[in-house]
Amino acid sequence: MLTSTHPVRMLTSTHPFRMLTSTHPVRMLTSTHPLNADIYSSCLNADIYSSCLNADIYSSCLNADIYSSCQNADIYSSCQNADIHSSCQNADINSSCQNADITHPNADITSSCQNADITSSCQNADITSSCQNADIHSACQNADIHSACRMLTSTQPVRMLTSTQPVRMLTSTQPVRMLAIYSLEC
């Protein structure tokens, strides 16, 4: 579980999810870094698994989507309109991430980040570069996961992520769910 000195915030989006599709298979990755449940049990092998649709950090995935050093992370700190960093090329993970769930050429978000569920102003999502009240933030001021965070504690055992499955087509017309996010003081 993640501890926080910040109050719980509720994040709401008025924008519906767009259909995100990838024709590339997910590379098989094995991480040697402790993940603290980078993709939680119900989300294993899929960055935004069907059970996590419409919620960037689903309730069952809370406390662990991103590893602290962006070496095993789902979301990079400077996202612009996407789950992924704007420099990402078709990936859920920034190209600089070394041990992420999905490597940078093969994921379900385009480099232009035009169709993802997180805005650069953090007005309608829980992850963005300028997040002030978001789940992930470049300064890690109000977030529980960030590249500068040194420790993410978890009661779950360390997992190794391995996947040979193709990226799933994620389709939703529903708005992002309201999520209660606990942030981690770095």
Image: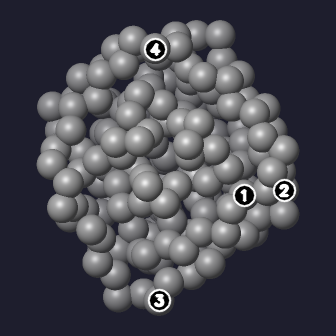
Amino acid marked by disc 4 = Gln
Q: Are marks 2 and 1 in contact (CB under 8 Å)?
A: yes
Question: Where is residue 63, by image quadrant?
Answer: bottom left
**Mark 1 = which residue?**
176
Identified at 49% across, 60% down, the residue is 59
In the image shown, does 141 or 36 lie closer to the viewer?
36
**Mark 2 = which residue?**
15
In the image shown, does 182 or 156 lie closer to the viewer?
156
Q: Are marks 2 and 3 in contact (CB under 8 Å)?
A: no
- Mark before the other along the chain sequence, 2 or 4: 2
Mark 4–mark 3 distance (CA, rounded to whole Å): 38 Å
Q: Where does the image place residue 168, in percent across and percent down from the top left?
A: 60, 22
Mark 2–mark 4 distance (CA, rounded to whole Å): 29 Å
Single out the mark in the foreground, 1 or 3.
1
Single out the mark in the foreground, 2 or 4.
4
Numbered disc 4: secondary structure: loop
Q: Are marks 1 and 4 in contact (CB under 8 Å)?
A: no
Q: Is residue 147 visible?
A: no
Q: Where does the image place residue 69, in percent across and percent down from the top left?
A: 29, 49
- Which numbered tag is attached to residue 165? 4
Amino acid marked by disc 2 = His
Image quarter hosting the C terminus: bottom left
Mark 2–mark 1 distance (CA, rounded to whole Å): 7 Å
Amino acid marked by disc 1 = Val
**Mark 3 = which residue?**
7
Is 186 placed left or right of 73 in the picture?
left
